[in-house]
C-alpha cells in the first residue's frame, strides 16, 4: 500500500521532470528572478537558521512542523510573481501554477523546475506521504499528493511560512499605478494597455506547446 502510493507519485514526478524540461525549453513558467545555474547547497547550522528565521519559519522549515490550516499569509495570494524559499531564496513556484485546493495551504500543480525540489517518503502519519524539501537548503516545504489538477495531476501542498512571495516587477508597477488613482489631476495620461487575457485561471493548464 505504502509502496503503491509512493510509487504512483514517483511516476508522476518522473513525468514532471520530463515536462519541466520541456517547459524550460519553451520558456514556460519563467522565473523573473532568472534561472539559477543549478542547486548549489546552502548549509547552515541550526543556530544560524534560528537566528535568520522566525520561530514558526524555523519550526516548519528546519523541524518539519506544519502551520495551522488557513493560517498562511500566502494562501489567498493571487498576485503574479514567484514563490521563493524563505530560507535560501531559491525560486520554487510560479504564481501561474497556484490553484485553490480548499485545503488551507497554498497549493501548486508544478514547481518552477523539477530540480528546485527534492522528495522523500514520509512515514510519520498513518497514511504515508511524500515530503517536499528545497533542493538548495533542504528546508521542509510541505508534501506532494497525486490529487492535483491537470496537466500534472499533482498537488504541492506547501506551508505559507516556508515561502516568500516576490511579485513580478511588471505586476508590481501595475499595482502601484492602479493603487493610487488620481482622479483630479493626471499629468501624464499613459496609454492603456489591454489587460492580459485571463492571467491565471486557477487550475487551467498552461498553453501546450504544439508538436
Ligand atoms: Zn531553500
Image (cartoon, rainbow, N blue to C red):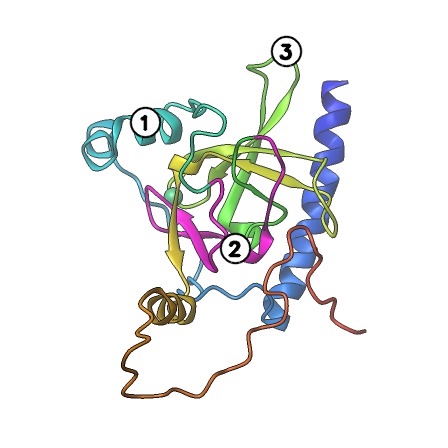
Q: Which residue is mark 3?
A: 126
Q: Residues within 10 Å of mark 1 (few under 14, many from 20)?
A: some
Q: Residues within 10 Å of mark 2 (few under 14, many from 20)?
A: many
Q: Which residue is mark 1?
A: 56
- The answer, for residue 138, to whether it is visible in the render is no
Residue 113 is left or right of residue 163, and the answer is right
Residue 106 in magenta?
A: no
Instruction: Specify the label residue 95 is tagged with.
Output: 2
Give the mark nearest the N terminus, 1 or 3: 1
Marks 2/1: CA–CA distance = 23 Å
Q: Residue at x 59, y 53 (%)?
A: 97
Instruction: Tell me the mark number nearer the camera, choosing from 2 and 3.
Output: 2
Q: Front-most of 121 and 110?
A: 110
Image vertical order of residue 38 relative to residue 157, above or below: below
Tell me which corner region of the image, top left, top right, bottom left or bottom right, holds residue 55. Answer: top left
- Residue 94, x across and y down, in percent: 52, 56
Give the residues in magenta.
Answer: 75-103
SS for dot 2:
helix
- The answer, for residue 74, to whether it is visible in the render is yes
Amino acid at each position: 500500500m505504502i509502496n503503491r502510493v509512493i510509487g504512483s507519485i514517483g511516476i508522476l514526478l518522473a513525468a514532471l521532470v520530463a515536462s519541466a524540461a520541456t517547459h524550460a525549453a519553451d520558456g514556460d513558467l519563467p522565473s523573473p528572478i532568472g534561472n539559477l545555474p543549478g542547486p548549489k547547497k546552502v548549509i547552515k547550522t541550526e543556530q544560524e537558521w534560528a537566528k535568520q528565521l522566525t520561530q514558526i519559519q524555523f519550526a516548519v522549515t528546519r523541524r518539519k512542523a506544519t502551520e495551522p490550516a488557513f493560517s498562511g499569509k500566502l494562501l489567498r495570494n493571487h498576485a503574479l510573481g514567484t514563490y521563493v524559499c524563505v530560507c535560501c531564496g531559491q525560486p520554487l513556484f510560479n504564481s501561474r501554477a497556484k490553484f485553490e485546493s480548499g485545503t488551507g495551504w497554498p497549493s501548486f500543480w508544478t514547481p518552477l523546475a523539477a530540480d528546485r525540489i527534492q522528495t522523500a517518503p514520509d512515514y510519520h502519519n498513518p497514511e504515508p506521504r511524500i515530503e517536499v524539501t528545497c533542493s538548495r537548503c533542504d528546508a521542509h516545504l510541505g508534501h506532494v499528493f497525486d490529487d492535483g489538477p491537470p496537466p500534472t495531476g499533482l498537488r504541492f501542498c506547501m506551508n505559507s511560512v516556508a515561502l516568500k512571495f516576490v511579485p513580478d516587477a511588471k505586476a508590481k508597477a501595475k499595482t502601484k499605478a492602479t493603487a493610487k488613482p488620481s482622479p483630479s489631476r493626471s499629468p501624464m495620461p499613459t496609454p492603456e494597455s489591454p489587460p492580459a487575457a485571463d492571467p491565471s485561471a486557477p487550475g487551467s493548464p498552461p498553453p501546450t506547446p504544439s508538436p
